[in-house]
Each structure stands twice: as structure tokens, then as C-alpha cells.
Image: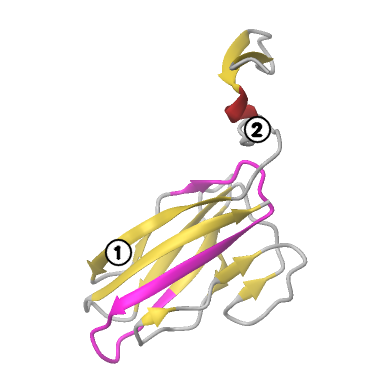
Amino acid sequence: MADKTQVLIAGDGTPVPISYADIGGGLYGGPVTNVEGTLLASAVRAATNFTADQVNPNARGVRVSYNITAVPGTDTITVQIQGKDPVSGNYFTILAGAAQVATGQKPDLIVYPGVTATANVAVSEPLPRTWRVNVVHSAASNFTYSVGFSRIA
């Protein structure tokens, strides 16, 4: 297959050159492969924060992993996977993990249709088009953690 191909943009009929990788990667509705990445690199954080909006081209779900490397004592953090309402722009919590107070790699949070629902770990729902991760701090004390993801086809 050639390095470039042409795809018609819906509505205007203008051919636009895109790479085969763009098509295969799901940008234009083609097959999707599992994609992983970093949502929050390891850093000290003292307040509730959220990731940038993530765009889901056509994956069915996501697995969010997080690792806590420093805790302040008895304060906690809770990791939430949130969807975004396309009309209002408001966020809603799809899944909230258990409050964490200790260091270590924590159980992955899974949003995927057909998965066995488990409190604070997994929910049987499809991943919405726009989503993010929100990390809620119980107090303004320093935690160090990282958050990553894997979209699941």
C-alpha cells in the first residue's frame, strides 16, 4: 500500500491526504489498536487535580493504572474516571477507586462493557468519546503519584 492515500471528508467532498497509519489508528473510523500513555507523570501534588480531556476515537474501554510513591500520613487520594457530557460540558464519574493512603502500585480501574462489575475497581460500561481522570485529595498535603492508561479495543 502507498504511504499516502486520499479520504473524502464528509460534507465537502474534498480529498485530503492522510497516512495509512492515521486510518489504521482509528482517526477516521478504521480499526483501533490498544493505545497506552501517561496521563500524569510522577510528581508531587498537594491538591485535587484532573487530566486534560482524552479523546476516545473508537475504543470500547480503558484501563487506568496508578502508582503512589510518597504519602503524607493519614490523608487519602481517590482516583476517578470521568466522562464528559457533550451537551453541557459537565463531567460525571463513571468509576471511583477506593481511597488510598499507602504507597505502591494500586489496582487498575477498568471501564469496559461486559466486564464483571467490582466495587471501586471495574464497571461494565462503554468508554465515552471524551473522558478524563480526576484525582481527589482529602486534604492539601503532598502526595507523589503517576497515572497511566491503556485504551482497550
**Residue 53 drawn at (x, y percent):** 46, 49
Question: Is residue 54 located in the magenta-colored stretch of the structure?
Answer: yes
Label 1: how many Cα within 10 Å (few below 14, some 14–19, many 20+)? some
Residue 18: which disc?
none
Q: Residue at x 68, y 9 (%)?
A: 13
Within the image, what quadrant is residue 120 found in?
bottom right
Dot 2 falls on a residue whose secondary structure is helix
Rendered view: 146 above or below 18 = below
Above or below, 32 against 105 in this view is above
Q: Is residue 81 above or below residue 32?
A: below
In the image, 127 versus 4, the foreground residue is: 4
Q: Name the residue furthest right.
A: 114
Q: Which residue is mark 1?
A: 42
Say which residue label 2 marks.
24
Task: State the image coordinates of residue 19 (x, y, percent, origin top left).
Answer: 57, 21
Residue visible at 25% across and 90% down in the picture: 73
Between 63 and 118, the residue placed more toward the observer is 63
Give the CA separation, mark 1 to mark 2. 31 Å
To which quarter of the image does residue 25 belong?
A: top right
When the figure is inspected, residue 76 is found, relative to residue 89, above or below; the finding is below
Q: Residues within 10 Å of mark 2 (few under 14, many from 20)?
A: some
Q: Quadrant of the N terminus?
A: top right
Quick one: SS at disc 1?
strand
Q: Which is more toward the observer, 75 or 85?
A: 75
Picture quadrant where residue 12 is located: top right
> The residue under label 1 is which amino acid type?
Ser
Residue 42 magenta-drawn? no
Q: What is the magenta range?
A: 53-78
